[in-house]
Image (cartoon, grey):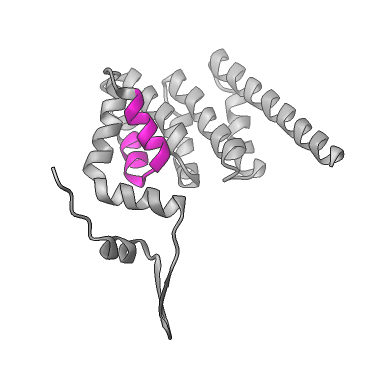
Amino acid sequence: MSLSVDWRAIAEKLGTITRTEHGWSERGGTHVACDAIAEILGDSVLREAVDFYVSGEPGFEVAKSVLMLLKPSASMERCREIFRDPADPQQAADAIELLRMVADRRVLAWLPEFLASDNDAVRIWTLGILDQLLVMQEAITPEEAAPFFKQALVDPSSNVRSAASRFLEDLAECEQVIAMRSLMQ
């Protein structure tokens, strides 16, 4: 199988080419590469990767790893669609667990819907999304995360409340480590 790629068309679609008075300039890097690979694969392949991951079939971790690397919008949207399908509560939870690893700050608008779910596992994985966005990606502020953690601390489920408490304890420890590092410099 030979794959022909129109690199110029991809660069133009991604907006990485800037016309200048002397011709053009370009930007690249890891994020551009991931966006280009996602473009080459196409939304249908990326959505199928989400479906394969939540199926739990052998090879699902490879699909997850690719989606984690690329973080394509199509995978975020597919995770939300699977969550909204009430047919399989385990797949809904698995979709939110995957979303934790592929999400960006755009999912903040979706979190109230996830926290309103009847599925405890969905609500717990939603806290994982907050943790990823707040600590790992530094894509949101503590002020943006606080209302969601407050809601989880009064959740009807003791499992959700306990998970929220653990996340907040871990965040406090993380802040202490950061403070200690700054004192040692």
* Relative vertical location of residue 142 with respect to residue 12 in this rendering, above or below: above
x, y percentage for residue 139? 57, 45
Q: Is residue 120 left or right of residue 150?
A: left
x, y percentage for residue 19? 39, 78
* Relative vertical location of residue 185 with respect to residue 11 in this rendering, above or below: above
Q: Is residue 8 left or right of residue 166?
A: left
- Which residue lies at the image location 56% right of the left edge and 41% below the top edge? 137
Task: Name the one closer to the observer, 72 or 61.
Answer: 61
x, y percentage for residue 181? 80, 36
**Quarter of the image where the N terminus is located:** top left
Q: Is residue 12 left or right of residue 69?
A: left
Task: Classify residue 175 by image quadrant.
Answer: top right
Q: Residue furthest bottom?
A: 21
Q: Residue furthest right?
A: 183
Residue 74 magenta: yes
Q: Is residue 118 left or right of residue 149?
A: left
**Quarter of the image where the C terminus is located:** top right
- Which residue lies at the image location 23% right of the left edge and 60% below the top edge? 6
Task: Classify residue 22 by image quadrant.
Answer: bottom left
Q: What secondary structure do most residues of the magenta stretch adopt?
A: helix
Residue 139 magenta: no
- Which residue lies at the image location 18% right of the left edge and 54% below the top edge? 4
* Relative vertical location of residue 17 with respect to residue 179 in this rendering, above or below: below
| Residues shaded magenta | 61-80
Task: Name the one closer to the observer, 41 or 24.
Answer: 24
Task: Name the one closer to the observer, 39 or 106.
Answer: 39
x, y percentage for residue 24? 40, 76
